[in-house]
Image (spheres, grey):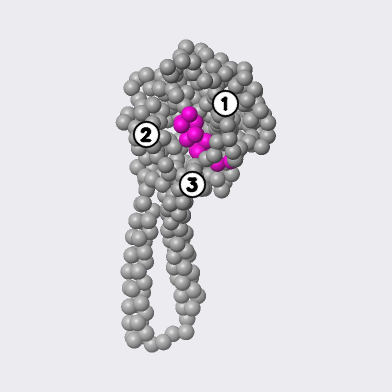
Amino acid sequence: MKSVIDLSVVIPVYNEQDVLPALFDRLYPALDALGVRYEVVFVNDGSRDKSPAMLAAQFDLRPDVTRVVLFNGNFGQHRAILAGFEYSRGDRVVTLDADLQNPPEDIKLLLAEMDKGHDYVGSIRRQRNDSLWRHLASRAMNHLREKLTRIKMTDQGCMMRAYSRRIIDTINQCNELHTFIPALAYQFAQNPTEVTVGHEERFAGESKYSLYSLIRLNFDLMTGFSIVPLQLFSLLGMLVSAGSGVLVVYLVLRRLIVGPEVGGLFTLFAIAFLLIGIALFGIGLLGEYIGRIYQEVRDRPRYVIGAVLEQKDKP
């Protein structure tokens, strides 16, 4: 008979050998204190350091509550979380980054909100210790994302979140290659909420998200959950076309009334460069959507699993 698990904690791991000992020392006592049956599902996302060996050692130490999914390469944080969802068995699932920026001791805050009847609990970092540019960029993208997708998340960068089993099962039915899990869960949630959690400096190592990675993530979020950018660009195209028509009529009438003029060359260059820039931006935006279609129709697996370390249930 399959064991009943109350809570699954899914943690993606990528080159975190300096953080894992501290994570183990804080995570398991925090979960033991909850007094529920739990499991921790680590997903190694193709780490090139000692992380896989350390996860295997931790499995040997606590095989009753530990499962380790070992990827056969690096597929990205969100695909690692999706694999964790596939292998999780808990009635409630909490996602947590391995860098200890969100304290494991705050998991109880998310579970307390779920006890009130919420099926999805997002999180808001109490005091962000990120750089100023990253803080401002995050706020700007949050505002833009809410306007375009109607998905309300105060802090989209915090991955410490709790999901009901119904939402997890629904997410597991989705086969898209590129997605943003918190936004996907928000669409499936019936009674979502948010709770404030702690935010600490990264315990060790460096952030795996570069500026380019953050831009790519937001492109996935915008193009994966809304066609509003295409609609806005279509509207802009109509406005530019109407404005160009008015300008042509004006120039023809001016030539008939005033006569030919020598000046205005650089003005025409500026207008031409503006229109060319708008056209190139539109082509790039359209390319984002076409690229997503291209990647989906190839129907390649989202990840490849090399091994799974788990304790088999006793009959």
Contact flag, marks 2 and 3 (Cβ < 8 Å)? no
Task: Measure the alpha-carbon separation of dots 2 and 1.
Answer: 25 Å
**Residue 81 is inside the magenta segment:** yes
Q: In this view, does 120 lie above or below 284?
A: above
Q: In this view, does 102 lie to the left or right of 152?
A: right
Q: Going 58% across and 32% down the picture, which residue do you hit?
A: 307
Q: Going 34% across and 35% down the picture, which residue do you hit?
A: 188
Q: Which amino acid does label 2 sit on?
A: Thr
Residue on which disc 1 sits: 309
Q: Main secondary structure of the magenta part?
A: helix
> Which type of secondary structure does the marked residue at label 1 adopt?
strand
Q: Is residue 150 above or below residue 255?
A: above
Q: In this view, does 81 lie to the left or right of 250?
A: right
Residue 300 is tagged as 3
Q: Where is residue 8 in the image (x, y as percent from the top left)?
A: 47, 23
Contact flag, marks 1 and 3 (Cβ < 8 Å)? no
Residue on which disc 2 sits: 170
Q: In this view, does 155 lie above or below 292?
A: above
- Locate residue 20: give its quadrant: top right
From the image, which quarter does the N terminus lie in? Answer: top left
Q: Which amino acid does label 3 sit on?
A: Arg
Q: Going 62% across and 17% down the picture, which residue do you hit?
A: 61
Q: Going 43% across and 44% down the picture, which residue do you hit?
A: 176
Camera-side residue: 305 or 259?
305
Q: What stretch is highlighted in magenta?
A: 74-87
